[in-house]
Amino acid sequence: MGEQRQRFNEDFKKQTVKYIQDQTKSVPEIATELNISSSTVHKWLAKYREFDNESLANPEKVRQLEQQLKEKERENQLKERALADLQEELAILKKALHIFSKEKN
C-alpha cells in the first residue's frame, strides 16, 4: 500500500507561509527543510497570499519598507557614481596607452 498523506492544520500552514516570507531561502529549500513537497508549499503560498497583504496594511511595516527602499536607492546612487568614475578612469588609461604605445621617430 501507498504512503499515508500528511495532514497539516491551518495554523501550521500560515506559520509556514510567514516563515517563507521572512526567509531568503527558496521555496524548494524550505520545503526540503520541513519535509514537505514544493508543490504543496506553493499551493499554501497562493492560498495565504492575503496573509502578506495584511502585513502591508500595517503603517509601521510600510514605513520600514519605505526606509529600506530609500537605503537601497542611496546604495544604487553610490554604486552608479563609482561605476561612472571607474569608466572615466578606464577611458583615460586607454587614451594614455594609445599615446604612449605609438612609435617615436
Image (tube, rainbow, N blue to C red):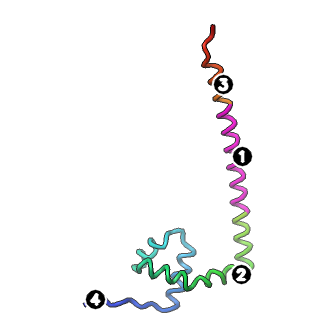
**Identity of the amino acid at label 3?**
Ala
Q: Earlier in the sequence, mark 2 or mark 4?
A: 4
The numbered mark at residue 58 is: 2
User: Answer yes or no: do the residues labelled 4 and 1 have beta carbons within 8 Å?
Assistant: no
Q: Residue at x 69, y 60 (%)?
A: 72
Q: Position of residue 28 (x, y in %)?
A: 45, 72
Q: Position of residue 19 (x, y in %)?
A: 53, 78
**Identity of the amino acid at label 4?**
Gly
Task: Using the numbered discs, state the Cα–Cα distance from disc 2 to disc 4 in whole angstroms.
Answer: 45 Å
Q: Residue at x 44, y 71 (%)?
A: 29
Task: Using the numbered discs, state the Cα–Cα distance from disc 4 to disc 3 in whole angstroms.
Answer: 74 Å
Is 70 situated above or below 47?
A: above
Q: Which residue is mark 1?
A: 81
Dot 4, crowdedness within 10 Å: few (<14), some or many (≥20)?
Answer: few
Q: Which numbered mark, 2 or 3, is in the foreground of this view?
A: 3
Residue range in magenta is 70-91
Is 94 situated above or below 55?
A: above
Q: Which residue is mark 4?
A: 2
Q: Is residue 89 magenta?
A: yes
Q: Which numbered mark, 2 or 4, is in the foreground of this view?
A: 4
Q: Earlier in the sequence, mark 4 or mark 1?
A: 4
